[in-house]
Image (cartoon, rainbow, N blue to C red):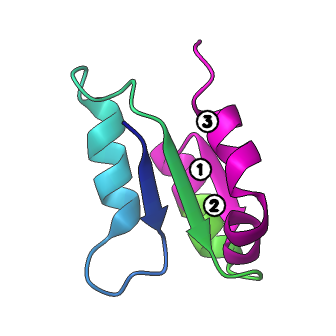
Amino acid sequence: MLVLADLSSSRTDVGAAIARLKQDPATAHIPVIAFADEGADALQSAGRRAGATLVVTDSAVLSHLPQLLEQALQVE
């Protein structure tokens, strides 16, 4: 399982959802790739603070998805 999280979603506080996922021992192992627009530094920082495995820009998700998946899914 892998979660792709759009930090700029207006429907919910995605950072809070990531934090809940990472704080629960039953789901903390699930990798999260969070993304936001370039220049959305506050959103990207919020994703990092929440515990996202990777935080990238929208364009990085589109152009580098295979590499991001490989990096996020590496067994610790």
Q: Going 47% across and 36% down the picture, which residue do you hit?
A: 31
Dot 2 falls on a residue whose secondary structure is helix
Q: Going 63% across and 73% down the picture, which residue do you hit?
A: 42
Q: x, y (%) of residue 45?
A: 63, 61
Q: x, y (%) of residue 61?
A: 67, 65
Image height check: is 53 above or below 57? Answer: above
What secondary structure is the stretch in magenta mostly built from?
Answer: helix
Disc 1: which residue:
48
For badge 2, the amino acid type reads Ser
In the image, the segment drawn in magenta is 47-76
Image height check: is 67 above or below 13? Answer: above
Tell me the distance, in whole angstroms, between the alpha carbons under discs 1 and 2: 5 Å
Dot 1 falls on a residue whose secondary structure is helix
Number of the label disc, if any, that sits on residue 13: none
Badge count: 3
For badge 1, the amino acid type reads Arg
Are the residues flagged by discs 1 and 2 in contact, CB closer than 8 Å?
yes
Image height check: is 11 above or below 48? Answer: below
In the rendered structure, the answer to whether residue 24 lies left or right of residue 61 reads: left
Number of the label disc, if any, that sits on residue 72: 3
Label 3, residues with CA under 10 Å away: few <14, some 14-19, many ≥20: some
In the rendered structure, the answer to whether residue 33 lies left or right of residue 14 reads: right
Q: Nearer the viewer, residue 23 or 55?
A: 55
Q: Residue furthest top?
A: 76
Disc 2: which residue:
45
User: Which badge, 1 or 3, is on the more N-terminal residue?
Assistant: 1
Tell me the distance, in whole angstroms, between the alpha carbons under discs 1 and 3: 14 Å
Tell me the distance, in whole angstroms, between the alpha carbons under discs 2 and 3: 18 Å
Q: x, y (%) of residue 22?
A: 36, 35
